[in-house]
């Protein structure tokens, strides 16, 4: 491949370029609760929406480590931009890891790389209490293909996405947990908005509720079960890439606190500002967060390349590590930003200073709510009753 972005250095440069654009528009994206079109447009221009797609299909063939690094870099300037990229990569990973044996999905992923299609996820549903492993709606087979209607409580950037990846019951008579994923192409679905998206943080993800109505050919139903895809791909990629976004938020908050302390030191040469000790403590928390994420990324990457990758990814030990990563990262990001605000004081509290942390704080508060930590801890508790530590 002659594309310069395909090299690690080229990808890094392209992500940095998108980060610079995201930084210019981040405050307006937050203020207006609008989609970060400029940053996502730059990612498309650099062909980064196909980063996880194999090279033989026109993608960059990157691993989860490269995806994680890109999400962190982008989120340092605009958390909403980083989260949109993360959620798109999660959907692409599901198709790459569970659809490549089917000709349709190989052709689709090639088209995705060529046209830089943006995919949104439709896992939430009214009436299931936030449980993504349970569906009310079902795919209904017809002579001409299928029909699928869903009352989704949220669809992040649904109105801006090209295509949708939807979870539903396998058939009208299937159990709530017997689910599949279905790819919906633009033009084959309609979205009727049911709620607004006026939130405390992550405003640029544009995630209101919709009633979805769709149809399509049966080949767009992803082979296998969503139970396997969830355990082997959606959960690990979600927790890793979300954590990468939260690391970006935390990293920029620490950078602003560091800049504040250095500015204080320059005003009083020869003395150490009283906030320096708190900055030192803060940096240790950031290092803990970064090292925890990096360790899980390395292990996940090794498992993805191993001979029994699916079996290992479905193991209780790895599932517990994923849950622990999500809970710890979501708690640390808020703690780090809050501590950084304490260092910067009123200049961090104000919205018009270089040390402003209001957006960071509000965005970080969403982390514990994206699949509620109480729900995850309850699942971990049940697994720990039977898991034998190796």
Image (cartoon, grey):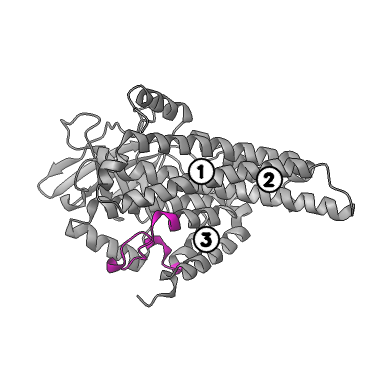
Q: Position of residue 164 (x, y in %)?
A: 33, 50
The residue lying furthest to the bottom in this view is: 2
Q: Nearer the viewer, mark 1 or mark 3?
A: 1
Which SS class for mark 3? helix
Q: CA distance from mark 2 to mark 3?
A: 21 Å
| Towards the viewer: 125 or 384 | 384
Q: Residue at x 49, y 46 (%)?
A: 293
Which SS class for mark 1? helix
As drawn, the label of residue 362 is none
The residue lying furthest to the left in this view is: 143
Q: CA distance from mark 1 to mark 2?
A: 24 Å
Q: Position of residue 138 (x, y in %)?
A: 22, 36
Q: Which residues are magenta?
A: 45-67
Residue 369, magenta (yes or no)? no
Vertical placement of 123 versus 47: above or below?
above
The quarter of the picture where the C terminus appears is top left
What residue is shown with label 2?
A: 357
Crowd around label 1: few <14 · some 14–19 · many ≥20 (10 Å): some
Q: CA distance from mark 1 to mark 3?
A: 28 Å
What residue is shown with label 3?
A: 39
What residue is shown with label 1?
A: 292
Q: Earlier in the sequence, mark 1 or mark 3?
A: 3
């Amino acid at each position: 491949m002659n594309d310069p972005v395909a090299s690690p250095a080229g990808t890094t440069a392209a992500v940095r370029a998108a980060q610079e654009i995201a930084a210019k528009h981040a405050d307006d994206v937050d203020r207006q609760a609008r989609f970060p079109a400029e940053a996502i447009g730059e990612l498309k221009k650099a062909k980064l929406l196909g980063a996880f797609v194999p090279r033989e299909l026109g993608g960059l063939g990157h691993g989860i480590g490269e995806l994680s690094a890109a999400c962190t870099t982008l989120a340092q300037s605009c958390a909403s931009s980083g989260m949109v990229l993360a959620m798109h990569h999660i959907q692409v990973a599901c198709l790459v890891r569970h659809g490549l044996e089917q000709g349709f999905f190989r052709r689709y992923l090639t088209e995705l790389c060529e046209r830089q299609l943006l995919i949104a996820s439709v896992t939430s549903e009214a009436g299931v209490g936030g449980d993504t492993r349970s569906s009310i709606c079902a795919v209904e087979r017809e002579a001409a293909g299928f029909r699928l209607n869903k009352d989704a409580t949220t669809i992040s950037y649904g109105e801006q996405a090209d295509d949708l990846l939807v979870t539903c019951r396998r058939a009208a008579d299937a159990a709530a947990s017997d689910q599949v994923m279905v790819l919906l192409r633009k033009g084959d679905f309609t979205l009727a908005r049911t709620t607004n998206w006026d939130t405390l943080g992550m405003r640029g993800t544009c995630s209101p509720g919709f009633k979805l109505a769709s149809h399509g050919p049966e080949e767009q139903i992803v082979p296998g079960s969503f139970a396997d895809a969830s355990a082997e791909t959606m959960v690990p990629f979600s927790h890793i890439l979300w954590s990468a976004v939260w690391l970006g938020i935390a990293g920029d908050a620490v950078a602003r606190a560091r800049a504040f302390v250095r500015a204080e030191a320059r005003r009083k040469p020869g003395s150490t500002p009283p906030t320096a000790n708190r900055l030192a403590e803060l940096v240790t928390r950031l290092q803990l967060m970064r090292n925890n994420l990096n360790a899980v990324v390395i292990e996940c990457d090794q498992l993805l390349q191993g001979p029994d990758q699916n079996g290992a990814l479905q193991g209780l030990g790895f599932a517990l590590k994923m849950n622990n990563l999500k809970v710890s990262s979501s708690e640390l990001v808020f703690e780090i930003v809050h501590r950084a605000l304490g260092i910067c004081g009123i200049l961090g509290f104000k919205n018009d200073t270089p040390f402003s942390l209001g957006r960071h704080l509000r965005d970080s508060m969403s982390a514990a709510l994206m699949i509620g930590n109480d729900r995850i801890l309850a699942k971990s508790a049940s697994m720990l009753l039977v898991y034998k530590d190796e």
